[in-house]
Amino acid sequence: MLGSVASRAVPGSRLRRPPAALSLGLAVLVGVAGSAGVLVSAKDRTDSVTRVEGVVEALEQQANDAPAENYLLVGSDSREGIAEDDPNAAAIGSTDDVVNRRSDTIMILRRERNGGAALLSIPRDLWVEIAGTGREAKINAAFNDGATRLAATISAELGIPIHHYVEIDFAGFQRLVDQIGGVEICTMYAVQDLHSGLRLDPGCQVLDGSMALAYARSRYYEEWIDGEWKRDGTADLGRIQRQQHFIRTATEKLLATVESDPFKVGELIEAAIGAVAVDENLDPVKAASALRQAAANGLVTYSLPVDFAEHRGQSALDLRVEEAQPILDYFRGVGPLPPPPETTTPTSN
């Protein structure tokens, strides 16, 4: 039923519009600012961006002189900064309701130095061994111990080197969406998710930050069809596809906003600075320039092939190792860009 979204990104498709995960909104904004002739001002603002220390250094990787680099993009489920009067506060929860911090979204953006980029979505329910602990759990649980543990787990379990880190939390996500005036999403049916607070009427509507968060977080997506609510049943995998669609739409809106009103660049950059945290070595200005070059060559999106599974009484996802090999080899830097996967729908055990 994911087809009920009127326009969406399909895993394996190539996007010709400038791409980036919303958590890289800062880099995109700085890149646009540079083209608008205010790069110096943008550089001054980016000096105050929040830094996450030790993430890349802890992996003890050699200096990256390869023809590509990987960005670990994380959407944190931290409730810090969520206003009590937020219309969706009950569904989001508070810091009292959600004590542990988990990675709500995990993506790897691989940027080729000579142009081109690919985005890999990692299901948060993927069952792995958490690096340095000797225990197994869903991969999003690694974030409980911080960004370094998550990066180490991805490197150890999937063999993907991490060169840079970018993180955004719920409140930052909402601020970015509100600052660009919301994002339009179109659906064929009325949709809801009682867990995330999502409620949309049929047709097209502009989502503010609060409802956009509910849309991006939806794992229990339901549509009103033939007089009853029908759940799509794809859980985290369906959410990944909706997130990829939202990322593309939001980025297009962001760039269109700046192009139509260059004077808004300063406000957008300041909003983005307050929304993201990056590793110590990431230069947002240089990253923006590199990502804009990559965007000109298009973005290929991938999701890991997985099977539904149960571990220790928990619903989880197991990696289809053989099918995943070409995708992982590319992101590891040891294989060519693979053809788009035919499907990302899991099978039941």
Image (cartoon, rainbow, N blue to C red):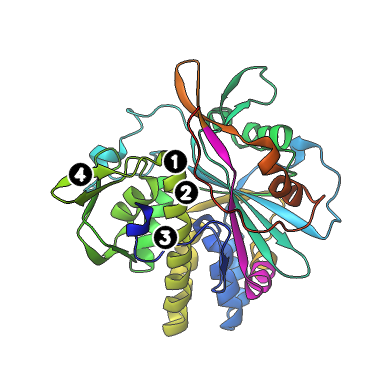
Residues marked 3 and 4 touching at CB (< 8 Å): no
Q: Earlier in the sequence, mark 1 or mark 3?
A: 3
Label 3 is placed on what type of residue? Leu
Residue 134 lies, with reference to residue 54, above or below; the image says above
Residues marked 1 and 2 touching at CB (< 8 Å): yes
- Measure the C-alpha gap from mark 2 to mark 3: 20 Å
- Measure the C-alpha gap from mark 1 to mark 2: 6 Å
Label 1 is placed on what type of residue? Asp
Q: Earlier in the sequence, mark 2 or mark 4?
A: 4
Q: Earlier in the sequence, mark 4 or mark 1?
A: 4
Decide: few, some or many residues near mark 1? Use Cα within 10 Å; few <14, some 14-19, many ≥20.
many
Residues marked 1 and 3 touching at CB (< 8 Å): no
> What residue would you read off at disc 1?
236
> What residue would you read off at disc 2?
240
Q: Earlier in the sequence, mark 2 or mark 3?
A: 3
In the displayed structure image, the side of residue 248 where residue 211 appears, left or right: left
Q: Secondary structure at mark 2?
A: helix
Q: Earlier in the sequence, mark 3 or mark 4?
A: 3
> What residue would you read off at disc 4?
229
Mark sitting on residue 176: 3
- Measure the C-alpha gap from mark 3 to mark 4: 31 Å
Q: Which residues are magenta?
A: 289-307
